Image: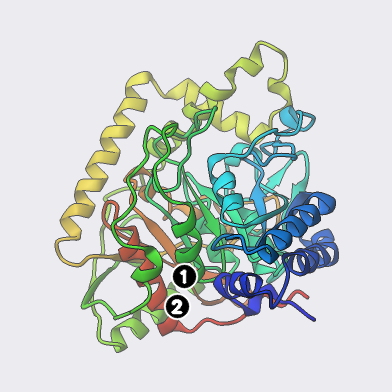
Amino acid sequence: MTIDFRNETVGELASRVQSGDVSARELTEAALARIDELNPTINAFVAVDADLALRDADDLDRRRAAGDDVGPLAGIPIGVKDLEDAAGFRTTHGSLVHANDPVAVSDSVLVERMRQSGCIIIGKTNTPEHGHKADSTNLVFGSTRNPWNTDFSAGGSSGGSAAAVAAGMVPLCTASDGGGSIRIPSAVNGLVGLKPSIGRVPGGGPTPTSWADLSTKGVAVQRAEDLALVLDAVIGPDPTDLRSLPMPEQSWVDAVATLHTPRRALWSPTLGYGTVDREVAELCQAAVDKLAAEGTEIIEVPVVFDEDPVMPWLNLAMIGSLAALRSLRDDGRWEQLDPGHVALMEMCESHATAADVIDATRVAHVLNLRLVELFHQAPLLLAPTVAGQPGAPGSEGTINGQVTPSWVAFTYPFNLTRSPAGTVPVGRTESGVPVGLQVIGPQHGDAVVLRMLAVLERVIAFDERAPLS
């Protein structure tokens, strides 16, 4: 029996395991075979434990046969982004500093909930050092390549997770987003992605996140339907997470069960400060036009924000990283860090005062006030997910052929505002790499964003799969 994870939803696969139509072992073996075939080219997985995964799959099959409830994600093989713990695997954070750390003896809160829901942990997926950039390249494992065109990066920082799902190695991976790290790789790998509100998916545990008010955990999947099912299984408060949100009143699966195009939506082609790649602009505009043809009134907003808030975001992110890593200066391991990461931290350290860091939170407040004002006109804002296209693995992306870090200038504003934000694929560039349209919602309006992603998925009908096979 041939299993192609790209042709079935996560729910369909789990239902087949629950019914006994297919075993968890068979899904796990299919994942391992696909990884063996494609990972040497893609480099999405950085660690795999086939024996452990097969033992866990066999245990789940025994429990299912005994009549036990094996969970809503029964038998789903997954990868875990190498920034969080999965018992039995080393958490390297993509850094030479941690390359030889002991293996984790417990799971992160997210991974624990995924196990409890029936998932089978296959291994760890690639990420840049401590998730600091939008390209999944590090000094330990090298670069992750885009399965749509391996001459290009898979994005980051959840690039390993997104590439693994897009290539059909597994149907699901964990991910996180502190400046676009779910939305960027989801966009350039042709996935539907969602950055949930901070606190929806617990980020607690024994070690606090260094990007506390920016970063939120989530998943990499193919479809909005998959997002709803998986997130329903893992959201909810945890006492170790200071930012935990209560369970939403409505199931997110129910939220996408019946879809209607919204009466109105805001559309900002540049957010007011960005330069957009020609191909990206054309594909996003065509998607918005399709939504309009379905009856949605599109309200164009030329200026969402008066200027690019990159420095307030960067100050919060890199001073947070510095606070978490500065002890490495005392024990001589600072030199093992990625030079690019060090340069960003030291730049912010030398230029940003304590007042600047505090002021960044004020900027976030002001940016959110602007969104509140806009959401009086319509409940959702649309914009390109990324302004440009990914570059070669290990390099910055481009806008109209020019290399620039501004290719990802449209995601981090919504980490500052803590807005739920997602992305849906709208087409491919001439190089074959997918482009995403971003959907931004009001505070804690995750279900509203999720519904819009599902609507756009239907309206745009981007149903292609990465050609690498």
> SS class of the residue under badge 1?
helix
Q: Which of pointers 2 and 1 lies earlier in the amino acid sequence?
A: 1
Residue indicated by mark 1: 224
Q: Element under label 2?
A: helix
Placement of 208 over or under 67, stated as above or below: above
Describe residue 451's horizontal placement relative to residue 185 as left or right.
left
The location of residue 92, given as percent across then percent down, is 71, 36
Quadrant of the image for the N terminus? bottom right
- Residue 427, position as x, y percentages in the image: 53, 78
Mark 2 or 1: the one toward you: 1
Image quarter for residue 342? top right
Residue at the image position 34 percent from the left and 50 percent from the top: 247
Left or right: where 138 falls relative to 253: right
What residue type is disc 1 on? Answer: Ala
Place of residue 117 in the rendered image (x, y in percent of width and height, measured from the top left): 56, 56
**On the rendered structure, is 381 left or right of 27?**
left
User: Is residue 396 positioned above or below 389 on the image?
Assistant: above
Placement of the C terminus among the 4 image quadrants: bottom right
Classed neighbour count for the residue bearing mark 2: other residues with Cα under 10 Å, few (<14), some (14–19), many (≥20)? many
| Farthest front residue in view | 66
Q: Are marks 2 and 1 in contact (CB under 8 Å)?
A: yes
Q: Which residue occupies 54% across, 46% down?
A: 110
Classify 10 Å Cα crowding around label 1: few (below 14), some (14-19), many (20 and above).
many
Q: Is residue 243 visible?
A: yes
Q: Which mark is residue 457?
A: 2
In which quadrant of the rendered view does residue 252 lie?
A: bottom left
